[in-house]
Amino acid sequence: MESIKVFCPATIANISCGFDVLGVALDSVGDEMLVKKTKEKGIHISKLEGQDLPLETLKNVAGVAGLALLEKSNYQGGFEIEIYKKIKAGSGIGSSAASSTGAVWAMNQLLNEPFSSLDLVKFAMEGERLASGVAHADNVAPALFGGFTLVRSYNPLDVITIPSPKQLFATVIHPQIEIKTSDSRKILKTNITLADGIKQWGNVGGLVAGLFKQDYDLIGRSLVDHIIEPVRSILIPSFDAVKKVTLQNGAIGCGISGSGPSIFSFSKGEETAKRVGIAMAEIYQNIGIDYDVHVSKINSEGIKILN
Ligand code: ADP
């Protein structure tokens, strides 16, 4: 195989109580990439459509993640990459992770899979380091493995895949305002109280158990964030109002997607997820902020080959 076209899913990270550790891949939202083997060494990004992002290898997360893979490979050639962005950069649904994982996953396929999925997570994390200054794995892991993933430990890196209940749907609204990941990290407190810690890890355990048991009520009860959301939500206009209408319309839970400004909610069934999307959209229509809404089932495979 000399070239491959792939779908690279959008992802929700920082799922409520699972800040920096829990993420999930979406099915109907994502970028496309075409990756070709070349005789010349290195990575060349020849095309980037849909967003205004740098083509320079060292400034694009696909280039940086790809170079991390090449450094560990015996392959003597290089790769040319075309990126078709559908996910807006800085939206909070893993735009950078889609490009860095798509690049390394496609390259691994073209080289006959010398690397494990965990190796690919590590290469893609170098792209995340470029995007946000922190090599976090909670977007790249679900993009590569599919479904929900838990980053149990960063050192050593330990990623656990978690099954997704069949009828679980995500609704994501992206209000078109800019929040820099670095700014939304800066406002976080570095210490937490023991009381908050106890509530938070109770919910992480409950959420993981709920996903395994396909227990939607338990998932909903556990989608609570006592630590990050109260601080970060002040950066997102009408966050409390949006959250309230999602729950009134039948969503089982709602929180900040990634570092915002996108807001996600989970529902049982597509109909409810669509109704929740309409209710979320009304809030931003009323205050005059443009938005995108996505309704998606959970993507259980991660990156997929396109014909
Ligand atoms: P998201 O919030 O959607 O996860 P990030 O904030 O993680 O997005 O990443 C966006 C940042 O990464 C922007 O600063 C953007 O310029 C940079 N970047 C570099 N290459 C890419 C790429 N191929 N796709 C998306 N963002 C990229």
Image: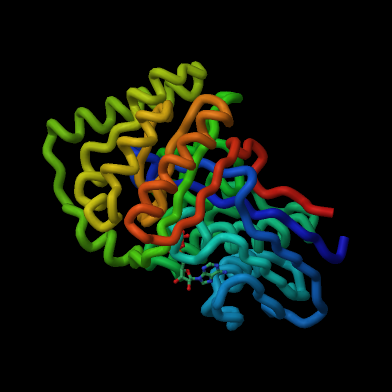
Describe residue 118's horizontal placement relative to residue 105 as left or right: left
What residue do we see at 40% from left, 18% from top?
217
- Which residue is found at the position 14% from the left and 48% from the top? 191
Name the spot of residue 175 as percent of width and height, x first: 41, 57
At which x and y percent is residue 185? 27, 60
For the C terminus, the image quarter is: bottom right
Q: Position of residue 164 (x, y in %)?
A: 56, 28
Outermost residue toward the front?
286
Color scheme of the displayed model: rainbow
Question: In the rendering, at what x and y percent does residue 283 appear?
Answer: 36, 48
Tell me the quarter of the picture where residue 259 sits: bottom left
Q: Residue furthest right?
A: 1
Q: Is residue 153 visible?
A: no
Q: Residue at x 55, y 77 (%)?
A: 52
The answer to which quarter of the image holds residue 3 is bottom right
Question: 257 or 267, which is in the foreground?
Answer: 267
Along the horizontal axis of the image, is 52 left or right of 191?
Answer: right
Question: Can residue 280 be seen in the rendering of this structure?
Answer: yes
| Apparent side of residue 257 relative to residue 120 in the rendered image (left or right) | left
Q: How many numbered marks are there? A: 0
- Looking at the picture, does residue 12 appear above or below residue 58? above
Figure quadrant of the N terminus: bottom right
Position of residue 17 relative to residue 46, above or below, is above
